[in-house]
């Protein structure tokens, strides 16, 4: 019996350690949609495919199908994050997690986008944590770069100006706890994708 695409995503996340290294085992995560991540070189994140550092140097575009949320009358907004649980290496992740990107106020494309063919999500707010491209140290092997899309609790959601996620020097980005961040702000995970860059 073949798995449906969303069940296949969950199984892949378990098989490759994203659950539990980034996503907690409890409560169980059930994807609500597919998160498409495309870089300016045309390369896409495909659940753990290996990309070159040059492919991932620029901030990617993301796309996802709108989630139907019966209990929300307003158009849902989302928070997108990218994190590296393998810093400085998967064997010695003493800096887990390294925060690469945090964006709030992400919206699904308008319905008219189906006609234009531009299905990229709309980034309506400046990044809380500006995109920092993968730069795995030499000799540290494979790094998993995980992108997670969370539904925000309300349309007025924002990250406080003094939040750790706004301290963006490299030294401030290590040892981030995405699960703690999510619990603090009441975010609900709806989609995940990831890719690998090798520290050679």
Image (tube, rainbow, N blue to C red):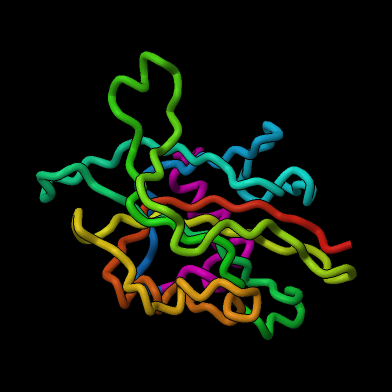
Viewer can see residue 16? yes
Instruction: From the image, give the main secondary structure of the stretch colored magenta.
Output: helix
Which residue occupies 63% across, 62% down? 16
Q: Is residue 13 left or right of residue 92?
A: left
Tell me, yes or no, whether the highlighted magenta stretch contains residue 24. yes
* Vertical placement of residue 150 versus 185, above or below: above
Q: Quadrant of residue 150?
A: bottom left
Q: Nearer the viewer, residue 165 or 197?
A: 165
- Magenta-highlighted residues: 1-25
Tell me, yes or no, whether the highlighted magenta stretch contains residue 118. no
Which residue occupies 67% across, 61% down? 144
Which residue occupies 32% across, 75% down? 183
Viewer can see residue 3? no
Instruction: Return the residue found at the far bottom.
Output: 94
Q: Position of residue 34 (x, y in %)?
A: 45, 41
Q: Nearer the viewer, residue 60 or 3?
A: 60
Q: Quadrant of residue 99?
A: bottom right
Assign the C terminus to one quadrant of the image. bottom right
Q: Position of residue 83 (x, y in %)?
A: 57, 65
Circle count: 0
Which residue occupies 25% across, 61% down? 157
Q: Is residue 196 left or right of residue 177?
A: right
């Amino acid at each position: 019996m073949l798995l449906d695409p969303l069940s296949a995503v969950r199984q892949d996340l378990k098989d490759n350690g994203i659950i539990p290294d980034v996503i907690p085992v409890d409560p169980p995560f059930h994807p609500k949609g597919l998160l498409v991540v495309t870089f300016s070189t045309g390369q896409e994140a495909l659940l753990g495919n290996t990309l070159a550092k040059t492919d991932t140097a620029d901030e990617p575009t993301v796309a996802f199908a709108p989630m139907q949320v019966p209990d929300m009358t307003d158009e849902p907004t989302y928070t997108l994050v990218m994190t590296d649980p393998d810093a400085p290496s998967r064997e010695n992740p003493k800096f887990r997690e390294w925060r690469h990107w945090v964006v709030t106020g992400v919206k699904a494309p308008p319905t008219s986008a189906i006609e234009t063919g531009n299905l990229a999500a709309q980034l309506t707010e400046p990044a809380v944590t500006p995109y920092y491209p993968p730069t795995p140290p030499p000799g540290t092997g494979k790094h998993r770069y995980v992108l997670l899309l969370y539904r925000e609790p309300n349309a007025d959601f924002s990250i406080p100006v003094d939040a750790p996620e706004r301290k963006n020097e490299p030294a401030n980005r290590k040892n981030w706890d995405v699960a703690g961040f999510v619990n603090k702000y009441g975010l609900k995970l709806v989609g995940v994708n990831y890719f690998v860059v090798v520290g050679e």
